[in-house]
Image: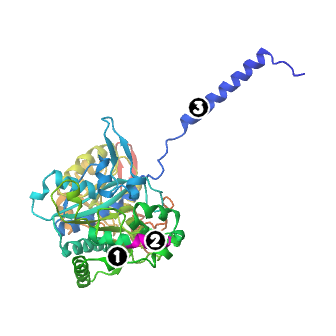
Amino acid sequence: MQPKTTPAKKTESKKSADESADTTAASKRRQPVKLLRGMKDILPEQQNYRHAVQKALEDIAVSYSYQRIDTPILEFASLFSKSLGQTTDVVDKEMYVFEDKSGDKVSLRPEFTAGIARAYIEHGMLNRTQPVKLFTTGQLFRHDRPQAGRYRQFNQIDCEIIGGRAPIIDAELIVVAHSLLKELGVNSTVRINSIGSEEDREQYINELVSYLKNNRRKLSEESKKRLTKNPLRVLDSKDEQDQLVIAEAPQIVDWLSEDSKNYFITVLEYLDDIGIPYVLEPTLVRGLDYYNDIVFELYDENEVQGSQSALAGGGRYDGLIELLGGQPAGACGFAIGIERLILAMKANRIGFSEAYIPDVFLAQLGKSAQKYSLGLMERLRGDGFKVRANLVKGSLSAQLKAANKIGSRFTLIIGQKELLDGTIIMRDMESGSQEIIDIKKISDELKKRLQKEPDELIPKVIGPQDEPVELENEDPRKPGNQNRNKNQNQNQNQEVKTTQDKDTGKKKSK
């Protein structure tokens, strides 16, 4: 016979359960909010590569007369489904689509070309001098499986030439992409193909489908689905099972019209003349419906064969402007994945120094000097100098270490004594030598000593002396110049003068 539970025990049991529930709820409240899967924070110490990419892009864009355009992150979903194709993986599986509060079906942009094509039509760019050359950078979104260099929110470089059909345009875009990668320390090889005109593809697809149906049992399940929806996409498969079938498949080059063949040959001749390395890739079709004729991708020459992901890709899309409601206009473009590019730069041991290298670092000692330094900093900036300071730090040693770390050529040191004397100490961070300068003449002295501004963002091969660092499962090497820092640290340890900080009554080392 079971003993009866007394009211007191029931009360204790209920109290214990309530306390447990409260503890669980409190624990949940204390848990920090986490990053969404497939997203990535770009921390301050990771920005140097992105600054380098942006600067290299802007330099080459100016040389080739491209103008920047920025389109919205949010567009009508129909823009992408119409331009990319309903059966593409991007539209079918990867787009972030939802209804906004107005009831419109909208999408986060999965790529740039469709939005730029819409802007070309909507803003009457057909009336400008043709062709129109545009470039942009920014965030894109695809609900894809996250992996190294591939995130659900990612960044791309995009270059487009709209309003012309000529082999020189295709060749120029390939040269721009190849040169941009090279300037960032990545040697690449172009893989190129022609998928011909719409009529060429229709004839080829009939032959391809017939061949694939005869070999259907050998295909992967994914390729069997693609066979009915978008047969050309079977050629994109990386599945080893599919590769055996694809190797024996008919090649589209045999179905090209004379016009498409001649166009393809002329583009290749341009690449030969300029010395751009390329490989003919008969199975390259790209994954979007708007392409015609030339398609291409760029790969890192140093990446192990078989494990490669394209760094860049693009092609010609002469029918897209008309498809979206504009007047017929030839067009061609490419995109480069910034995250993949940075991985390639790190794999090639390419590093970059501080994105903003100051001419001078301003170090201050004491409250009076701290107040004065803010105005002095603005005065030096107004005179055209790049100035860096940490007005919060009070330790001279910590400030000199900061100046060393960012590569400042000179450090200006000001304390209570210097304020009273109307002077400032100028320290050469390379030699460790110091001079007392009239504070009114500091700009003139800096101009004499800084014969030219330091070069910014120059890529260098990272040597074995550079200490490794791990960032989010990546295996890059930390960029830097350890030899220079070592010399500077030695100089920093040299004996320097001291000054009396009258605000605190303490001696500070200089």
Lower position in the chain sequence, tag 1 or tag 2: 2
**SS of the residue under disc 1:** helix
Q: Which residue is mark 3?
A: 25
Which label's residue is closer to the chain start, 3 or 2?
3
- Which of labels 1 and 2 is toward the front? 2
Residue at 19 percent across and 51 percent down: it is 379
Count of numbered marks: 3
Residue 460 picture location, percent across and down = 36, 73
| Residue at mark 1 to residue at mark 3: CA–CA distance | 62 Å
Q: Residue furthest top?
A: 7
| The image quarter in which residue 186 lies | bottom left
Of badges 1 and 3, nearer the viewer stands 1
Give the crowd class for mark 3: few <14, some 14-19, many >=20 residues within 10 Å: few
Percent position (x, y) of residue 504?
38, 43
Compare marks 1 and 3 and give the one earlier in the sequence. Answer: 3
Q: Looking at the magenta stretch, what is its main secondary structure?
A: helix
Looking at numbered disc 1 in the image, what kind of residue is underneath it? Ile
Three-letter code, disc 2: Leu
Few, some or many residues within 10 Å of mark 1 (<14, 14–19, 20+): many
* Residue topped by disc 1: 252
Cα separation between marks 1 and 2: 14 Å
Secondary structure, mark 3, is helix
Q: What coloring was used for the rendering?
A: rainbow
Residue behind mark 2: 212
- In the image, which residues are magenta? 207-215
Label 2: few (<14), some (14–19) or many (≥20) C-alpha neighbours in 10 Å: many
